[in-house]
Image: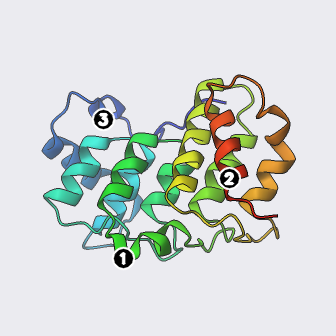
Amino acid sequence: MTAPTNNNNNNSNCFSSHSSCHHHVGVFDDYLKHCHEGCSRYCDWDRLLFACQQNKLDLVQHLITEGGVDPSYSNPMKQSALHIAARYGHIECLEYLLQNIPSDRLTDVINSKNRLSGATPLHCCLQKALNEHGDDLLRSRLVACALRLVQVGADLTMVDAMGKTPLDYWKENFEPFSQNDQGSHIFLLGQELQSKVTV
């Protein structure tokens, strides 16, 4: 399985990293008009979430630093930019969000559950990683996102709609492989989880 692409936009080449931020915003507005017909105003979180899904770090930076968009904002389904970046393995966007979410709100945002599956951002990347057996690079990026979230305080005991914690997903699907390739993200994540689990 390959990383998701924007199949609804006939001008997908406009999203290249060489385009200007202002051009990106114009393309996003056109896209959002297509997706939200009847809306007179297109919310900043739509742009931010879309930028995180497409891994457009320059746009994420532009929206937050110049547009005043709240990096911790979530949509009505409680799907935050952090959820999106984690789910798609976009470690660069995830790292930038973590650096810009106010420290007094960071723990709450990291451990927030969406209304889709009761998942936290950590659930999102570990669940997604389970289905990426054919894409080693994407799976590695998803595990890297999980590692970063654990490092900054993601709660390993949060339960999703399936009744599972992030630690459950780890034990069921990753722990047997965590002792192999000691330089890999999966090994480092295993070490980090082991250091945080109390007996």
Quarter holding the N terminus is top right
The reply to whether discs 3 and 2 touch (Cβ–Cβ < 8 Å) is no
| Mark 3: amino acid | Phe
The reply to whether discs 1 and 2 touch (Cβ–Cβ < 8 Å) is no
Rounded to the nearest whole Å, what is the CA distance between mark 1 and mark 2?
Answer: 24 Å
Question: Residue shown at 35%/70% (left/top)?
Answer: 103
Picture disc at residue 195: 2
Specify whether 199 is left or right of 90.
right
Q: Position of residue 25 (x, y in %)?
A: 21, 50
Quickly name the residue at label 3. 15
Q: Is residue 78 above or below residue 27?
A: below
| Mark 1: amino acid | Asp
Question: Residue shown at 38%/46% (left/top)?
Answer: 93
Quickly name the residue at label 1. 104
Q: Quadrant of residue 54?
A: top left
Q: Quadrant of residue 77?
A: bottom right
| Mark 2: amino acid | Ser
Specify whether 158 is left or right of 138.
right
